[in-house]
Amino acid sequence: MAKQDMPSNADRRATAQGILAMCREVRADVARIEHEAEALLASLEAGHEDPVKAPVQPSQD
């Protein structure tokens, strides 16, 4: 690879910062999903006060 084809340190730094930002977003998404899953499990364990009034209909995909 020729020297002119090598990315600059600024380009490498910008790429690394972009990757770190994506990692932070993924980490936040995982934390949100874990929180929602825990809430769902707690809801299922506690049960529901109101019964389901109509059967679930399959999607029309």
Image (cartoon, rainbow, N blue to C red):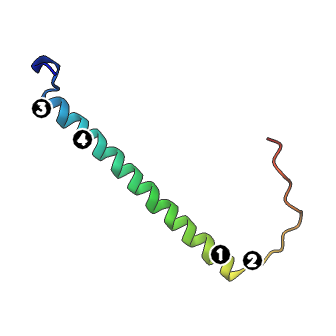
Assess disc 1: are there few (<14), some (14-19) or many (≥20) residues with their C-alpha within 10 Å of its C-alpha: few
- CB contact under 8 Å: marks 2 and 1: yes
> Label 3 vs label 1: CA separation?
51 Å
Residue 13: percent from the left, percent from the top?
Answer: 18, 37
Q: Which residue is mark 4?
A: 17
Numbered label tally? 4
> Label 3 vs label 4: CA separation?
12 Å
> Label 2 vs label 1: CA separation?
7 Å
Check the picture and name the quadrant holding the C terminus. Answer: top right
**Residue shown at 62% from the left, 74% from the top:** 41
Instruction: Give the answer, above or below, for where 35 lies relative to 25.
Output: below
Q: Is residue 28 left or right of residue 58?
A: left
> Label 2 vs label 4: CA separation?
46 Å
**Residue shown at 23% from the left, 40% from the top:** 16
Check the picture and name the quadrant holding the N terminus. Answer: top left
Q: Which residue is mark 3?
A: 9
Residue 57: percent from the left, percent from the top?
Answer: 86, 54
In the displayed orientation, state which residue is furthest to the front: 1
Tag shown at residue 18:
none
Q: Which residue is mark 2?
A: 48
Assess disc 3: are there few (<14), some (14-19) or many (≥20) residues with their C-alpha within 10 Å of its C-alpha: few
Q: Which residue is mark 1?
A: 43
Residue 44: percent from the left, percent from the top?
Answer: 68, 76
Residue 54: percent from the left, percent from the top?
Answer: 89, 63
Q: Is residue 32 left or right of residue 10?
A: right
